[in-house]
Image (cartoon, helix red, strand yellow):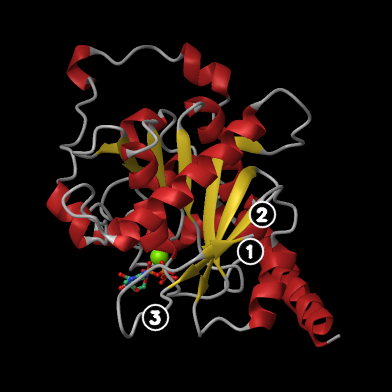
Amino acid sequence: MTVQTKTSHLIERAARHLRGLEDLARSAPLPPAPSEEAVAQAAPLSPATAFVPPPPIEFAVLEQAGMIPWGRKRDRVAEEFRLVQSQVLRQLDAAAKPGPHGASLPNLVMITSARPNEGKSFVSLNLAASIAHFGARQVLLVDADAKHTSLSHHLNISEQPGLLDFGAGLTPRPETLIVPTRLETLSILPIGGVGPSRHDLAAKVSLATAIERLARRFAPTVIVLDAPPCLSTSDPSALAPVVGQTVFVVEAERTHRGEVESSLDLIAACPTITLLLNKSQLTTNSTFGAYYY
Ligand SMILES: Nc1ncnc2c1ncn2[C@@H]1O[C@H](COP(=O)(O)OP(=O)(O)OP(=O)(O)O)[C@@H](O)[C@H]1O
Ligand SMILES: [Mg+2]
């Protein structure tokens, strides 16, 4: 009963938040995003404005941001990520088979948790890298968290345009926003919305719409979303019906059962949710722990 009260309270808060965003959007509407057809018919870039891709992110920077150095040593955490990536790919392949999928897109994998600092970015980066490395798939890791200490910040690409610019219709060609890495099958889409406009843009842009367009455009690339926490923003619940699966990070010995239950209620529209226990026994041995459904 406590959970139900808390959940409805959260839903009311989320609804109030959404109403606030709608008011904001009405007061200063964004230009409409161009349709897929308009983008496809856009004139090719002239040689003078030809797109020059940014330099790839070096392994050292990926590792500084938390990526486990694959292959250099047999690391327990790396082994566990390898298991999770094969589980995620199994789900993805099963969901990609013809059949009724509702509105969800199998190539979209959302990483979220109940609260901040539970390991979402750590899991996003390592899961994306593990799929790119062991799963031999093309992977796009999308920073979908507008806070200033996000993954883009750790990868030194927080000053580059990205998801918010695409969502706001400021950059119709998302290909020009993608940053390659030295791991050839892994690319990153920064959060974008550079400077003081980031929070304004984040409040106006519909992440779910932007991400759905990205997923359709880049299918069959696996798109891993480093999303904000469920109990702090409404984004995970808006994304839940669009993504094919969610990996929900639970911080061992910290996340409360009620917080997990409230969060799972908020993302219940997602067809497959995997709970992943992170930081278990962190005090004795940095680890990532077991996972289950
Ligand atoms: N399994 C782990 N082993 C060791 N360190 C970890 C592990 N998981 C997370 N961390 C560390 O914990 C800190 C918080 O992790 P991270 O930034 O991934 O959390 P987050 O959920 O993305 O936070 P935020 O909500 O602020 O975005 C980071 O310093 C990260 O390197
Ligand atoms: Mg994070």
Q: Nearer the viewer, residue 267 or 190?
A: 267
Quarter of the image where one finds residue 244: top right
**Is label 3 in contact with label 2 (beta carbons under 8 Å)?**
no
Amino acid type for the residue under numbered disc 2:
Ala
- Mark before the other along the chain sequence, 3 or 1: 1
Is residue 3 toward the left or the right of residue 120 in the image? right
- How packed mark 3 is, by other alpha carbons closer than 10 Å (few <14, some 14-19, many 20 or more), is few
Please tell me in which quadrant of the rendered image residue 132 appears: top left
Mark 2 residue element: helix
**Cα gap from disc 3 to disc 1, whole angstroms:** 31 Å
Residue sticking out furthest to the right: 1
| Quadrant of the image containing the C terminus | bottom right
Q: Which label sits on residue 238?
A: 2
Badge number at residue 234: 1
Q: Which residue is mark 3?
A: 281
Residue 180 is marked as none
